[in-house]
Image (tube, grey):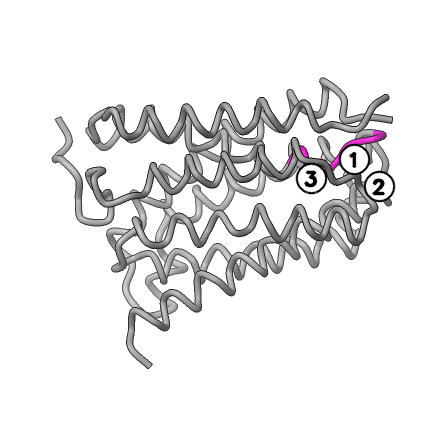
Amino acid sequence: MSTSLLSLFLVVVASFIGSFGAVFLKAGSKNLKSNLKSLFTNYHLAIGGLLFVISSLFFVKAISQPGAELSVLYPMVSMSYLWAMVWSRVFFGEPFTRQKFTGLGLIVLGIAILQLGKSNP
Amino acid sequence: MSRRRKNLLTVLGCTLLGAGAQVLFKLAGTALGPSPNPMAMIVCLPLIAGYVLYGISTILLSFALRNDELSSMYPIISLTYVWVMFLSVWYFHESLNSYKVLGVAVIMGGVAVLGSPGNSDPAKGGSPPS
C-alpha cells in the first residue's frame, strides 16, 4: 500500500482552505488583547478557526485512505505557505520578494523529494 | 524568565502539541476508515482529543506570535515536521528513508528562508495595504 493520489489531492485542498484560515487569524490578531473576552468576541478569529476545522476534515480524510503515510502527507501542509504568499499580497498588500520565491521554491522542491520517499505500492 | 524566552518555549510547546494532534488524527482516520459517517466522527475520541490539542496549540501560538518577530519563530514552528516524521516511523511503523529526511529538511530550509529577517516582516506591519 502506498499514499494515493486522492490523499495528495485532499491535502492540497486542506492546505488551500487552511491558508484562508490564516488570513482571518491575521485580520483578527490586530484586535487581540491578553484577556479571554477579546478571544471569544473576535469574529475574524472565529471564522479563521472554523476554516481550520474544515481544512482539518479534509486532512483527516486524506490520512484515512488505505496506505496513507502521515510522514508524507503532513509535511505537504507546508503548501499553505504558497497560498499564504498570494493572499498576503491580495489582502494585506505584502509584496512578493525574491526571498519569498526562494523559500517557496525550496518548500515545493522538498514536497517533490518527499514523493520519492513514498513506500512502494 | 524573559518574555522572549517565554515565547520561544511556548512556540516549542505548540510544535509538540501540534505533532500530538497529527498522531491522534491518524489514529482517528485508521479507526473511522476512508468514508466515515458524521455521527461516528462526532463520537470518535482520538478525533476529539486531536482537535483539543490542535485548538490549544493554535490559541497559544497566536498569543506567542502576536508581538514577537516571526523570523525567529518560523524555523521553530517547522520542527513539527520533525516530530511528526519521528512519530510516524516510531508509532505507525511507516518507512523511513533518505528521501523523506531530505524532503523535510529542504521544506524546513524553505520555511527558514521565508521567515528570515531580510523579508518584510508581517509581524511588524509589512507594507501598508494598497
Kindly identify which chain the residue marked by label 1 belongs to: A
Q: Quadrant of residue B103?
A: top right
Classify mark 2: residues with Cα within 10 Å, few (<14), some (14-19) or many (20+): some
The answer to the question of whether label 2 and label 3 lie on touching residues, with beta carbons closer than 8 A, is no
Q: Which residue is mark 2?
A: B32
Whole-angstrom CA distance, mark 2 to mark 3, is 19 Å
Q: Residue at x 24, y 43 (%)?
A: B122
Same subunit, labels 2 and 1: the answer reads: no
Q: Which mark is residue A99?
A: none
Q: Which residue is mark 1?
A: A64
Tell me which segment is drawn in magenta.
Answer: A66-73
**Same-subunit check for callouts 2 and 3:** no
SS for callout 2: helix
Q: Nearer the viewer, residue A31 or B5?
A: B5
> Residue B65 in the image: x percent, y percent?
33, 56
Whether tag 2 and tag 1 are in contact, CB under 8 A, the answer is: yes
How many other residues sit within 10 Å of disc 1, few (<14), some (14-19) or many (≥20)?
Answer: many
Closer mark to the observer between disc 2 and disc 3: 3
Q: Secondary structure at mark 3?
A: helix
Give the vertical position of A112 relative to B107 (above or below): above
